Amino acid sequence: MIVDELDVKDGYVKAEVHNHIATIEFFHPKGNSLPTKLLAKLTQEIDHISHDENTRVVLLRSEQHDVFCTGASLEEMIAITSEEDAVKYFHSYGNVINAMRKCSKLIVARIHGKCAGAGVGIAAAADYAIALEGAEVRLNELSYGFGPYVIAPALIRKMGLSAFSQIAIDSHLWRNADWARRKGIFAELHPNIESMEDSIERLTTSLSQNNTEANASLKKMLWEGTENWNTLLHERALTAAKLLLHPQTQKFLAGLNKSVVF
């Protein structure tokens, strides 16, 4: 994937297909955070690949940071002043989750580092997540003054209400990768990049050689019971938007540094 200087500065979403395997890669210089522009592009690429007859499996990955995804773009979130913009902001996360849900291809996620907020949601929305042992997870939204409402359905589906309650309520605690594996967010853990890449190549190659309709039918079965998510995720975006504009939340956000620090 060729990346120019503008992409490195503002972030990017790139997609390419080789041997029936579509690789979607995103990057942002601030902790692989996801401003709405990148979320829209990510949604667009997933939707496009869903209808691409040459693609049989999707590999979703991020690049260059020691973190997979820190979730929300704090700069963008802090700048929001209207409920309309807040709804659009949170709805953009729902769009990505929905695109992953509706995609006719199985999605394998490569989790090479920490996941926070919506980054955990994306890992959970993947059909199969392969991670490094250092890939800790945290839902920090409640500490900001709202909550992980939009990504909650994807997480509860994958890990259950009990585990979701733990990670959502204790919003300051990083959970280790083994916890995430035991709770169902990650399917595999690997001690190093080489081992992880070998497993990803093995699985994606295998899936790319399967009957396309069999993959699609399995995907549809795995997501049974989520047909109401168009409405549900919109309702959750409305809830998050109202809380984002709450005076107490705004006061907290005003004191935040406008960058993600780990």
Image (cartoon, rainbow, N blue to C red):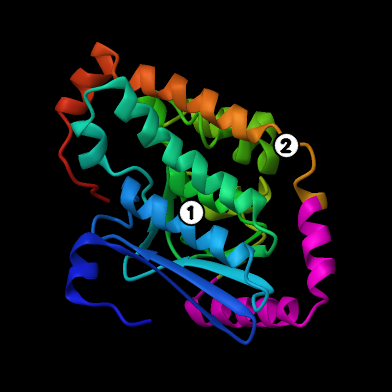
The picture places residue 43, in percent across and down from the top left corner, at 48, 54
The residue under the point 66% across, 29% down is 162
Q: Which secondary structure, mark 2?
A: loop
The picture places residue 87, in percent across and down from the top left corner, at 39, 28
The residue under the point 56% across, 31% down is 233
Asked whether 183 or 26 is in front, the reply is 26
Determine if the magenta segment contains residue 202: yes
Asked whether 100 or 84 is in front, the reply is 84
Residue farthest to the top? Answer: 247
Residue 227: mark: 2
Determine if the magenta segment contains residue 229: no
The picture places residue 44, in percent across and down from the top left corner, at 47, 57
Question: In this rendering, is residue 123 above or below 91?
Answer: below
Query: 10 Å neighbourhood of mark 2: few (<14), some, or many (≥20)?
Result: few
Question: In this rendering, is residue 82 above or below 65?
Answer: above
Residue range in magenta is: 191-220
Residue 43: mark: 1
The residue under the point 78% across, 52% down is 220
Disc 2 marks which amino acid?
A: Glu
Q: Quadrant of residue 249?
A: top left
Asked whether 226 or 260 is in front, the reply is 226
Disc 1 marks which amino acid?
A: Thr
Can residue 144 be seen?
Answer: no
